[in-house]
Every structure is written in structure tokens, then in C-alpha cells.
Amino acid sequence: MPTRTRTKTTIGWIGTGRMGYEMAGHLAKAGADVTVWNRTRAKAEPLGKYGAKVADRVAHLADRDIVFCMVSTWNDVKDVMQQLLAGKKQPRIVIECSSISLEGSAELRGMLAARGIEYLAAPVSGNAKVIKAGKLSFVCSGPRKAFDDALPYLEMIGPSASYVGEGELSRIVKICHNVFLGVVTQSLAEITVLAQKAGVPRHAFLEFMNQSVMGSMFTRYKTPAFVNLDFKVTFTPYLLRKDMDLGLDAGRRFEVPMPLAAATRDQIQSMMGRGWTEQDFATLLLQQAQASGVKLEPENVDVKDGLS
Ligand SMILES: NC(=O)c1ccc[n+]([C@@H]2O[C@H](COP(=O)([O-])OP(=O)(O)OC[C@H]3O[C@@H](n4cnc5c(N)ncnc54)[C@H](OP(=O)(O)O)[C@@H]3O)[C@@H](O)[C@H]2O)c1
């Protein structure tokens, strides 16, 4: 690899979808030297107002010191990484944040190791609103040194970065996390509709739940959607189904039965089959209401999401 004479670490950012846009924006606002690339360039351009540069081609990020990647599936990651590494230049570290399989992550590690590039697998917990609120969490695995070098930049994006060990260990942590996200959301939909059908307004029920030992940052920030039926997308049903499938694949591989995950995966599939694909995955509530013979109306109550 050619010797670098620059002193300031340069960052490349691949993928400015819902998550990547906010994450790269935090880096740029914190004063990092960031160049972003997105397949649909128009989505990356507004980051210019925070000082980020926008590249025309992903290969233009190859001379950056650290390249982050935040796209959708393993196939998409592979696609952009092949473009990134097509030329002679290469970054020192790649930090891959999309939610992908252990197998995909291991294949990427092999591709990068063959070029002498350090690789940190760094998936995240939290949606774009969580990033805006400064509460995103990373779970990281790979060489400890790559983690230590990346940490100042991870901390510009979110306050918490856990190092869980070598290899692809962070991937299984993230897969487990999102299986829980799906199961909890389905369960929350079931009990919210049950309480409503028995006569309790959703806002009153969820206010109690959120303050109880069962409440969480997640139940609080999903409450406005459940109460006022605002399903502006934060995370698509398609991406959640991908994560449930990753969880079920891992369950098969490690021979762990996952009955709740399997049932939830099929609830998500049914919801998608009914055409609820473009809104937030919290439309699991609408499906549950329909299955219960309950007609939902927005309650138009000013409930807090716990983030602002
Ligand atoms: N949303 C959440 O709450 C959340 C939370 C944690 C983790 N995640 C994970 O984070 C990742 C991104 O999620 P998101 O919600 O930001 O998704 P998103 O809004 O759909 O954005 C996807 C991004 O990937 C790009 N992309 C997809 N396929 C590509 C390809 N073949 N080549 C180049 N670029 C490609 C898209 O480019 P275009 O703009 O051109 O389409 C876009 O920038 C996913 O793995 C997801 O599971 C999401």
C-alpha cells in the first residue's frame, strides 16, 4: 500500500439511505473529512451542507484511510465492495455496518484480508431518529487494533460501541437483536389490540407499559406510531424479514429452535403479502387489528417518543 503523507484521517462513506445519511451526517458535522457515495446521487448531495464531498463513483473512495459501508443486503455489500476494490488504490480499514449474515461477513473478511485491508464488522442498533437523537449503538468485531483505530469515528456517530471479539461475532449479536425486535413488535401489537378491544385506549395502555418494568427505549419510540397510526417508514418490512430469515438460518446452523422467531417471520410475510410493504414495519399493528376484527383510528394524542 502506498505511504500516506496526509495527517488528517480521511473517511469514505458508501450508502446514504435512511441510516447511512444520518450516520455520515454526524461524521461531517463533527468535522471529519468525509467523502460520500450513493447509488442514487441525489440522496447524498444534501450532506454537502455539512461539509461532506460527494463522489461520482464508489471507486473514488478507494484512496480514503477508512471506508464505511451501509447498504442493504450481503449481495449489495459484495457489489459495492467489488467496485471499491477494482483499482490499485485501497483503504486501510473497512467498517461494514449493514445487517448481513455471518457467512457474508466472513466472505468479505476473506476478500479484504487478501488485499491486506483491516476489517471491522460493525452493525448498529437504532433507527434514523435514534441516530439524530445521538443514541445509536455499534456492536463490533474484528481485530482489536482496527476497533481502537476506528473508535474516535464511531463515537462521532453514536455514544456506544461495544467490542465483542474477533471475526464475525458482532453479526450474530445484531441478528439476535433484530429477531428480538421483530418478536417484541409482534407481541406489542397483539397486546395493544387486546387491550383496545377490551376497552382501553392505546395511549393509556402504552403509557402504562412504557413506565412499567417492561417498557424500553424501543417501546417508547414506537408509541407514537401505535397511538396515532403514523407509519412513515423507519425500517422496512422487507429489511425486517431479511433479519428474521438471518436469525432462522443461524438457528438452523447452530441447531437452536426458534419457535417465536418462526411465527413472527410468518406474520411479517403475511403482512407483506397483504400489501403492507412500503410503510414502517410497525404496520404489524394494522394486521393484528384486522385479524381481531378491530377497526383502528388515530387517537391524535400528543405522546412522546422518548428521544427528544
Ligand atoms: N432502518 C433501520 O432502522 C435500521 C436499523 C439498524 C440497521 N439497519 C440496517 O442498515 C442497512 C441500511 O438500512 P436503511 O434503513 O438505511 O435502508 P435504506 O434506506 O433502504 O437504504 C439502503 C441503502 O443501500 C443502498 N443500496 C442498496 N443496494 C445497493 C446496491 N446494490 N448498490 C449500491 N447501493 C445499494 C441504497 O442506495 P439507493 O439510495 O440508490 O437506493 C441506500 O443508500 C440495512 O442492512 C438494514 O437492515 C437498519
Image: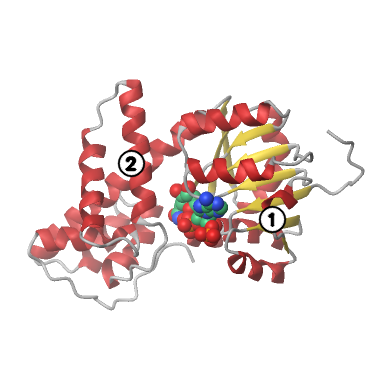
One can see residue 17 in this view? no
Looking at the picture, how far across and down is residue 102, in whole percent?
Answer: 47, 30
Choose the circle earlier in sequence order: 1 or 2: 1
Q: Is residue 257 above or below residue 126?
A: above
263 or 126, which is in the foreground? Answer: 263
Nearer to us: label 1 or label 2:
1
Report whether 145 appears left or right of 101: right
Looking at the picture, how far across and down is residue 181, in whole percent?
Answer: 34, 46
Q: What colouring style does the render use? A: secondary structure
Which of the 4 image quarters holds residue 291? bottom left
- Amino acid type at image mark 2: Met
Residue shown at 67%/52% (left/top)? 58
| Cβ–Cβ under 8 Å for marks 1 and 2 | no
One can see residue 286 in this view? yes
Dot 2 surroundings within 10 Å: few (below 14), some, or many (20 or more)? many
Q: Is residue 53 above or below residue 255?
A: below
Q: Is residue 106 above or below residue 284?
A: above
Which of the 4 image quarters holds residue 26? bottom right
Q: Which mark is residue 244?
A: 2
Q: CA distance from mark 1 to mark 2?
A: 32 Å
Looking at the picture, how far across and down is residue 127, in whole percent?
Answer: 47, 56
Furthest-bottom residue in this view: 300
Q: Is residue 8 above or below residue 254?
A: below
Residue shown at 64%/71% (left/top)? 46
Q: Which mark is residue 66?
A: none
- Amino acid type at image mark 1: Arg
Residue shown at 67%/39% (left/top)? 94
Q: Which mark is residue 57?
A: 1
Q: Dividing the image into 4 quarters, which one contains the N terminus?
A: top right
